[in-house]
Amino acid sequence: MNSVVLVGNLARDPELRFTAGSGKAVATFSLAVNRPFAKEGQQSADFLRIVVFGKSAENCANYLSKGSKVAIQGRIQTGSYETSTGERRYTTDIVAERVEFLNRANRDNQGGFGQDNFNGGFNDNPEGFQALDDDDDDIPF
């Protein structure tokens, strides 16, 4: 079974690309995951490359930024490639199947939501809408 669950903070902003041909969204970012204390008072972290596909990739690019805390559920994938000098390089990535946003980084300047203006999707005073009178007989139900 190849399954991994991680909780950590983004070490850099997500990078969004689209695949050639199908145009499928692909986001990549580094996740800093704390290790248990090695020595008293010292903390270290692993920096893991995360790859996300589809609508989740677009959401990550739009709503996450460096420092955002996330939970990742996915799988480990290894690969290799050859550099232009003929050297073989090996890669290990976490392919995220599920990404949960554990806090909201402030992305107001990019049209996203931040802690200051996020209200869980509910708006107490939506623009352009009026409350209906209880005695309105035009309602079809």
Image (cartoon, helix red, strand yellow):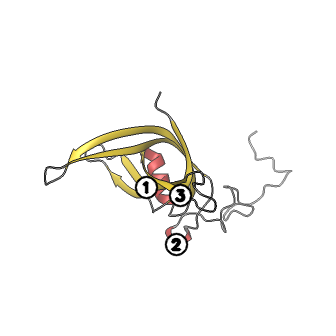
Quarter of image, res 103: bottom right
- Name of the residue lying farthest toward the left: 85
Quarter of image, res 116: bottom right
Q: Residue at x 52, y 72 (%)?
A: 109
Q: Residue at x 50, y 64 (%)?
A: 66
Q: Which residue is mark 3?
A: 44
The dot on residue 103 is: none
Q: CA distance from mark 1 to mark 3?
A: 19 Å
Q: Residue at x 38, y 56 (%)?
A: 16
Q: CA distance from mark 2 to mark 1?
A: 20 Å
x, y percentage for residue 42? 59, 61
Q: Secondary structure at mark 3?
A: loop
Residue density around tag 3, few if under 14, some if 14–19, many if 20 or more, within 10 Å = few
Identify residue type, mark 1: Phe
Q: Which residue is mark 2?
A: 109
User: Seen in the image, is 107 located left or right of residue 19?
Assistant: right
Nearer the camera: disc 3 or disc 2: 3
Identify residue type, mark 2: Asn
User: Seen in the image, is 102 located left or right of residue 132?
Assistant: left
Whether the residues at callouts 3 and 2 have beta carbons within 8 Å, the answer is no
Q: Secondary structure at mark 2?
A: helix
N-term mark: 2 or 1: 1
- Name of the residue lying farthest toward the right: 135
Front one among 42 and 34: 42
Nearer the camera: disc 1 or disc 3: 3
- Name of the residue lying farthest toward the front: 39
Q: How many marks?
A: 3
Q: Secondary structure at mark 1?
A: strand
Q: Which residue is mark 1?
A: 29
